[in-house]
Image (cartoon, rainbow, N blue to C red):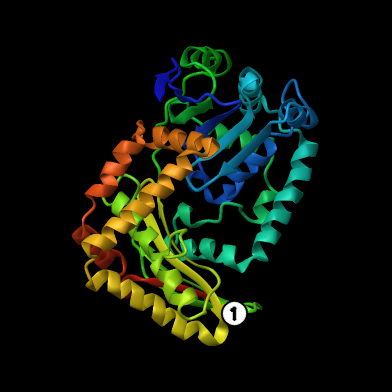
């Protein structure tokens, strides 16, 4: 894995992989939390409309440029980052990098295309509202971060989406897209020397712009229990609290703790308690998300409405066990091996790896090797897990959101 910094401050990271398929992406340290109140949804809207035309291409030509050679072009927006990336046959590195550069630096945002895409995004919002198992996570963050930009839904509102125009888009990009907050990430069959040459050709011309604007810090959290009446077959419940930020030394223990409780494996403690032993839930999961200056931990499950109270009690029982009963040597060793195996398997998916190393370089300015990450996991102690559980699972500090 190699890194380099262009003269304008854009960082690049590359891992050579001898494969017929390669991956390239641009990650930007800007997301929905960087929006002003009247801009809610604009970061995500930009992700849509950058594909709608440049100075030299119409939307049709943008899509066909990659898809005509069997590749895929994609993008995503989160609370703190935006990414545009492509997967393609390795012989098309130059084609893919030129196209993404064109999209990000030469988009014209035609008025007709903007109006059409507004309707698409509004339909996306409506579709999202019809999915309570997804909607509940955003509404829960509104409780945790009430009054802060990070609380707001990434998609925005139909009313605000309708107000966006080329001027508001360019204003947001000018104020929030900075060269020292951009990473070009690559995993594929190309030498670092050639990758640097292409990066300089297609991204080196961007004028240097250093970020000076500071993000608004998260302030006082007040726990809340909220019950929302919805016309659903199941009750949906989410329980959680604030958690360590991405720079905290507690981040890795928090990831392990979350995985033990409700990670992707069927033998997680919550899945065993609610689904396997009691048949009370089809979906139950625990999740930890770290942000720049805060984080959140939550447990989500959906269950029959008549089982809601019992299911909540089972969740609280598992959380109390983590607080009160230290993990044995064998238990902890198994949990570590499971997490190490999951990470190793994930690294074999090169698209995920490209995005992962890009994000790490974006936020930490470094990327740990798998070996170094495994060492950090092995160093986690039972007492660290227990102390963290007592800090995060304090019942008086938990917020609860229920759709029923």
Q: Quadrant of residue 45?
A: top right
Residue in the foreground of this view, choosing between 29 and 361:
361
Secondary structure of residue under mark 1: loop
Name the side, left or right, on which 167 lies relative to 390: right
Name the side, left or right, on which 334 lies relative to 215: left
Please tell me how many numbered marks the rendered image carries: 1
**Which residue is at the far bottom?**
306
| Image quadrant where one finds the N terminus | top left
Q: Residue at x 58, y 79 (%)?
A: 404
Q: Is residue 192 above or below residue 315?
A: above
Q: Residue at x 27, y 59 (%)?
A: 332
Q: Is residue 193 visible?
A: yes
Residue in the foreground of this view, choosing between 322 and 45:
322
Residue in the foreground of this view, choosing between 320 and 36:
320
Q: Position of residue 211 (x, y in %)?
A: 42, 31
Q: Is residue 161 above or below residue 63?
A: below
Callout 1: 10 Å neighbours few (<14), some, many (20+)?
Answer: few
Q: Position of residue 377 (x, y in %)?
A: 29, 48
Q: Residue at x 61, y 53 (%)?
A: 156
Q: Residue at label 1?
A: 229
Residue in the foreground of this view, choosing between 19 and 179:
19
């Amino acid at each position: 894995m190699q890194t380099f910094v262009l003269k304008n401050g854009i960082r690049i990271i590359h891992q050579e992989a001898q494969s017929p398929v390669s991956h390239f992406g641009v990650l930007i340290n800007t997301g929905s939390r960087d929006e002003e109140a009247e801009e809610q949804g604009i970061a995500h809207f930009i992700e849509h409309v950058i594909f709608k035309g440049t100075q030299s291409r119409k939307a049709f030509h943008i899509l066909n440029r990659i898809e005509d050679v069997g590749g895929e072009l994609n993008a995503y927006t989160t609370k703190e980052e935006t990414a545009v990336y492509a997967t393609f046959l390795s012989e098309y590195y130059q084609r893919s990098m030129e196209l993404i550069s064109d999209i990000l630096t030469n988009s014209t945002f035609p008025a007709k295309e903007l109006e059409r895409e507004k309707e698409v995004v509004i339909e996306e919002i409506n579709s999202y509202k019809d999915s309570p198992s997804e909607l509940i996570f955003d509404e829960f963050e509104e409780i945790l971060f009430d009054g802060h930009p990070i609380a707001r839904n990434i998609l925005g509102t139909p009313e605000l989406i309708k107000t966006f125009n080329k001027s508001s888009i360019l204003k947001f990009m000018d104020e929030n897209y900075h060269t020292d907050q951009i990473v070009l990430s690559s995993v594929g069959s190309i030498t670092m020397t050639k990758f640097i040459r292409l990066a300089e050709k297609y991204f080196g011309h961007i004028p240097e712009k250093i970020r000076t604007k500071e993000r608004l810090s998260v302030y006082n959290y007040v726990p809340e229990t909220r019950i929302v009446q919805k016309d659903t077959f199941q009750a949906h419940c989410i329980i959680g609290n604030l958690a360590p930020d991405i720079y905290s030394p507690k981040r890795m223990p928090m990831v392990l703790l979350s995985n033990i409780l409700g990670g992707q494996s069927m033998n997680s403690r919550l899945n065993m308690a609610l689904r396997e032993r009691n048949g009370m839930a089809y979906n139950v999961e625990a999740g930890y998300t770290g942000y720049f200056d805060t984080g959140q931990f939550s447990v989500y499950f959906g269950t029959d409405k008549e089982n809601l109270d019992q299911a909540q009690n089972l969740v609280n029982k598992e959380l109390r066990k983590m607080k009160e009963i230290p993990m044995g040597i064998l238990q902890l060793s198994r949990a570590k091996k499971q997490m190490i195996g999951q990470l190793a398997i994930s690294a074999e998916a090169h698209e995920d790896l490209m995005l992962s190393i890009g994000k790490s370089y974006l936020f930490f300015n470094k990327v740990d090797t798998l070996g170094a990450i495994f060492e950090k996991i092995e160093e986690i102690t039972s007492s660290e897990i227990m102390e963290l559980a007592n800090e995060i699972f304090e019942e008086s500090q938990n917020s609860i959101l229920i759709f029923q």
